[in-house]
Amino acid sequence: MIVRPNQHWFLSLFNWRGSVLPNILSRLALNLLVSVSAVILLPYYDSLGVHLTTAPFSLVGIAIAIFLGFRTNTSYARFNEARCLWGMLLITTRSISRQVQSILNDKADSLLAAQFLMAFSWSLKHQLRGTNAQTDLERLLPEPYLSEVLSSPLRTNRILLLLGEWLGQKYRAGQLSDIVWADIDKNLNEMAHIQGACERIANTPIPYAYGLILRRTVYLFCTILPFALVDDLRYLTPLISVFISYTFLSLEYVAEEIEEPFGTAPNDLALDAICTTIEINQLEMNDIRPLPSSMQPDPNYRLS
């Protein structure tokens, strides 16, 4: 995720780090090359008696803008839902830790619950990003729970199952009343809901054909556009064409990037920072010091 300090609006126009411009620069360069070619070839173009007008491009441009709006809204809806789910995970882990501490009143039990909750968040992060969670699990989970989780093909689900079994043992031993157990179980169900919703977003991409049609249309539009502008704009064609192409290409690129919000692209969610925040909260609630440092953006303003 890109995290930049507030700037004056004029200075922000020249930001390079954190913008999508470096990623679409090659495509804009191609459009510039086509625009220059259109200006150079204008005399030959006129001799053929073929004259493109901007009228059909205006209609197509409006249609593309509408479809890009739908695409961007759909991608942002996925991003926003993912952000809300991870925010809810932070709240739920705090609630469970508070309930365990206030009811069981045992530091060892409170710490074990915190270890389960921290391991769940880090494991879910690794699952969604397709990375190996073993290092973080070894750091957080004690034996024999660690061996059981590492041997499971569904590690995140196994952690939640073990947490539920452990709390169930406390309930059967009479350490949790029916009302308290029902409240804790509700929070466990919320964690299962968060996991399932994140898996749904990660495993259900926007239909490929929809994105492909839009991408082809945008690229074809930007490629042909200079030949429609050159009659009226002449030497201004490269400037205007590149500006219009920047608008369409940048919107298409951002929509493509945020439709998978759990990745490591610049505009994806900062899952490492969220997991670190959950860990800090759990350790602080158990009076463990020193606490890990909150993650900060790197020199390129990226927060992973």
Image (tube, grey):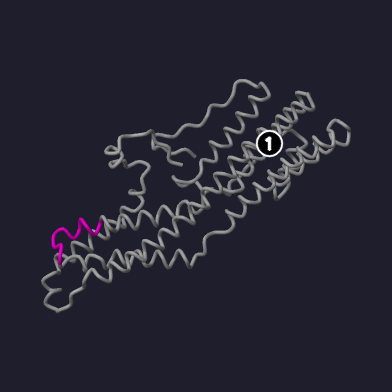
Q: Which residue is mark 1?
A: 117
Q: Which of the 4 quarters of the picture holds residue 125?
A: top right
Q: Pick the residue in front: 63 or 44.
A: 63
Which residue corresponds to the image point at 16% horizontal and 58% vertical from the top-left? 236
Residue lying farthest front? 179
Q: Which of the 4 quarters of the picture holds residue 63?
A: bottom left
Q: Which of the 4 quarters of the picture holds residue 85?
A: top right
The reply to whether the magenta stretch includes residue 153 is no
Which residue corresponds to the image point at 41% horizontal and 63% vertical from the top-left? 67
Which residue corresponds to the image point at 31% horizontal and 66% vertical from the top-left? 221
Local SS, label 1 = helix
Residue 70, relative to residue 303: is it above or below? below
Residue 250 at x, y percent in the picture: 36, 54
Residue lying farthest bottom? 49
Horizontal relation, residue 249 to residue 201: left or right: left
Residue 22 at x, y percent in the picture: 33, 48
Residue lying farthest right? 173
The type of residue carrying mark 1 is: Leu
Q: Residues within 10 Å of mark 1 (few under 14, many from 20)?
A: many
Residue 80 at x, y percent in the picture: 52, 48
Horizontal relation, residue 220 to residue 106: left or right: left
Residue 171 at x, y percent in the picture: 85, 35
Horizontal relation, residue 264 to residue 148: left or right: left
The reply to whether the magenta stretch includes residue 233 is yes
Which residue corresponds to the image point at 64% horizontal and 42% vertical from the top-left? 123
* The magenta segment: 232-242
Looking at the image, how many numbered discs can be counted on the residues? 1
Q: Main secondary structure of the magenta part?
A: helix
